[in-house]
Amino acid sequence: MTKGTADIGNSLMAASVSRRSVLKGMGGLGLAAAGGGLFGMPRGAQAADSINYMCWEGYNAPSILEPFQKEKGVSISVDLITDSAGGFAKLAAGASKDFDLVSSDSPWIARMGPAGICRYIDDAEFADQYAEFYPQFRAPFQPLQFDGKTTGLPTRWGWVGPTVNTKFDKLESWSSYAPVFDSAYKDKICLLDWGDWPIMPLALYAGVNPYEELDQSALDEVRKVLRAAFKNTRAIVADLAVAQKGLIDGSFRALIGGGTYCTSSLRLQGHDYIQSIVPEPKNGLKQGIIWMEATGLIENGKDSKVAADFLKYIVSPEVAKQLAITEATCNLVPNQKAEALFSDAEKKALQMDYMWTAWDNSQFHTVAPNVDDMLAIWQEELAAR
């Protein structure tokens, strides 16, 4: 990697469109009620301890925070973020001293290590939590390691691949991303304008691994594949509700760049003809992408036991189940014991019967070395479209 963490964080904060930012106005958890306040404490009560928590919506639900506060006699103050790179940049700029925990996209939890703002986790202390995880997420879990030390615990996950309306198309047609460029699909494809998320799978289709250092030749291939996709695409959409509506009514045969994050909630509402799949590997290069959220402890000099207790709590089966099924989105969780708590309808919505196929055929999402270059190419080609 040629660029420093702070440079990547600052440029991404300016350039990327988070999948959360498009959900912000969708009527999920109310931000005015849920953000920047204390939960579960009687008016005028003084807690014996406090936690300052930076997180995405969903993690701040009163049904999650209040039981812990009451049991531990602790107050939790929440700072909501809508952009993982922006949240990281805030911590790296000095706010880390004001926070105890953060729940964000896993690459940014991992990067707290090299940034010097991570309170590393002793895997032995969290052995009981790891024992409840699926084997794929147990220690040592490489995506959250830095210099052999653990930066956080995984909390939610899913995959990015073509999302297909099977009322209008066959899943077999999407064994690769070829339909994005097929004239038979002209004006039937929607690209989600979500920062690097639509770029990564199209780069993979072009034979470029975006998670490696790219030379000019590889970046030229990224430009070519984006230009070709734009020419055949009906719409490039940042608004999730618009994309979902077009997918349901058949205006779009498929969405590219979202995957399970934007479709599991539709499936739970009864639209089970919508599926997110992972294409087959192409020339040995896996074509799907696994995304993950994680929660990490922040080095603020306090070495808070109650913060560590909250980390154990947030990955417990019952809380994991609540994190999985929210009003705005539904996602898989790493806790294997939580699986027994899901209804058959919820398991079907989350495509649990397919999750390890997706896992085995996917890259694991990290912050790519040339993400700034690829985002710039996206904007240039979009402007010229």
Image: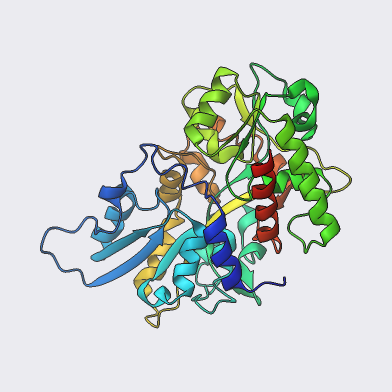
Q: Residue visible at 49% across and 74% down?
A: 92
Relative vertical location of residue 6 with respect to residue 104 in this rendering, above or below: below
Is 370 displayed left or right of 270 in the figure? right
Relative vertical location of residue 64 with respect to residue 181 in this rendering, above or below: below
Image location of residue 132, percent across then percent down: 53, 55
Looking at this view, is 327 or 203 the one in front? 203
Q: Quadrant of the N terminus?
A: bottom right
Looking at this view, is 216 or 91 the one in front? 216
Looking at this view, is 61 or 122 the one in front? 61
Image location of residue 59, percent across then percent down: 40, 52
Q: Residue visible at 35% across and 60% down?
A: 79
Residue reaching furthest to the bottom? 301
Residue reaching furthest to the right? 283
Residue 210 location, quadrant: bottom right
Q: Residue visible at 72% across and 72% down?
A: 2
Is 145 displayed left or right of 223 in the figure? left
Looking at this view, is 267 or 192 the one in front? 192
Tell me if I can see residue 249 in this picture. Answer: yes
